[in-house]
Amino acid sequence: MGQEMASSGIRRAAAGAAPTPSAIAAPPRVGEQIQRLRAERRMTLDDLSRAAGVSKSMLSEIERDKANPTIAVAWRLTNALGVSLDSLFAPQKTPEAIAVAGPHEIPTLSGHDAKYQLRVWGPIELAGKFEWYELTLQAGGALVSNAHEPGTREHLTVLQGSIEIEAAGTTKRLKAADTARYVADEPHAIRNAGKGEAKALLVVIHG
C-alpha cells in the first residue's frame, strides 16, 4: 500500500502535476478517535491500559495527540476496544452547527451501593480533557475517587442540599450555591452531608 502511494506520487511529480497543499488531506486525529471509542465503552484510562497492555502515561499522550502510536500499539488498542484498525482512519462526519441531545441520549452512571448518580453532560470527544456532570447523592451517598492524572482539578457547585468535600487531607462542608475547587490528582471524596437528596454540578479539568 505504501509503495503504491509513493509510486503514484512520483509519477505525478514527473508529469509536472505535484499535489498542492490544499489537495493533501489532513492526517486523522487518531488520539481523539481512541478517546471517543473508550468513552463510548465507559472505559477509564486504567481499563484500556490494562486491556491493551499499553502504559497509562503513553495512552494519555496518545489520546491528547501528543504522541503517535505505532501500528503495533494501535492494533493492541483497537483490539481491546473491539474495533478494526481501519476504524481509526475512517473520515469523521462534519459536525452539525447546532447538535441537540435529548434526555435519553445523556449517559448516566449509577453507583447503587454508594447512592450516587452521575449524568454525563460533557460531550464524549472532550472526555479525559474537560468533563462536566450533574451529581446526585442520596442521603448517606458518596462518590469516592482514586487519583486522576497529575495536575487534574475538580470544581463542584452545590445546587441542592449540603455536601462535604474531602481532598488533600482537608475536609470542607458546602451549602447550596457554594463552590469548591480542589486537587483531584490524589484520592478524594464527595459526600452528602445532609439528610435529604443533594445535587451538584461537577467539572473535571484534567492535567
Image (cartoon, grey):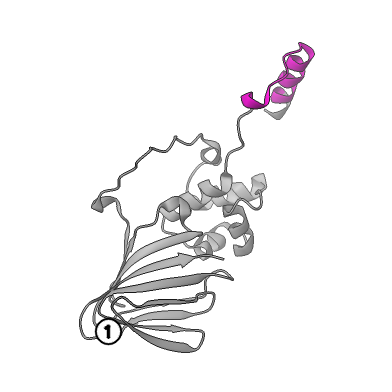
Image quarter where the C terminus lies is: bottom right
Image side of residue 133 versus residue 26, left or right: left
Q: Can you say whether 207 is above or below 4 in the image? A: below
Residue wearing tag 1: 140
Whether residue 109 is in magenta: the answer is no
| Secondary structure type for disc 1 | loop
Question: Residue 56: percent from the left, percent from the top?
Answer: 59, 63
In the picture as drawn, the residue positioned furthest to the left comes out as 196
> Which span of residues is magenta-colored?
4-23
In the picture as drawn, the residue positioned furthest to the front comes out as 177
Residue drawn at the location 57% of the way across and 53% of the way down: 63
Of residues 75 and 192, the one nearer the viewer is 192
Question: Residue 75: percent from the left, percent from the top?
Answer: 59, 47
User: What amino acid is labelled 1 in the image?
Assistant: Gly
Tally of numbered tags: 1
Can residue 110 be seen here? The reply is no
Q: Quadrant of residue 8?
A: top right
Whether residue 14 is in magenta: the answer is yes
Q: Quadrant of residue 116?
A: bottom left
Q: Can you say whether 195 is above or below 44 in the image? A: below
Residue drawn at the location 43% of the way across and 88% of the way down: 171
Of residues 76 and 102, the one nearer the viewer is 102
Residue drawn at the location 54% of the way across and 41% of the way down: 88
Dominant SS in magenta: helix
Image side of residue 171 versus residue 85, left or right: left
Q: Can you say whether 169 is above or below 100 in the image? A: below
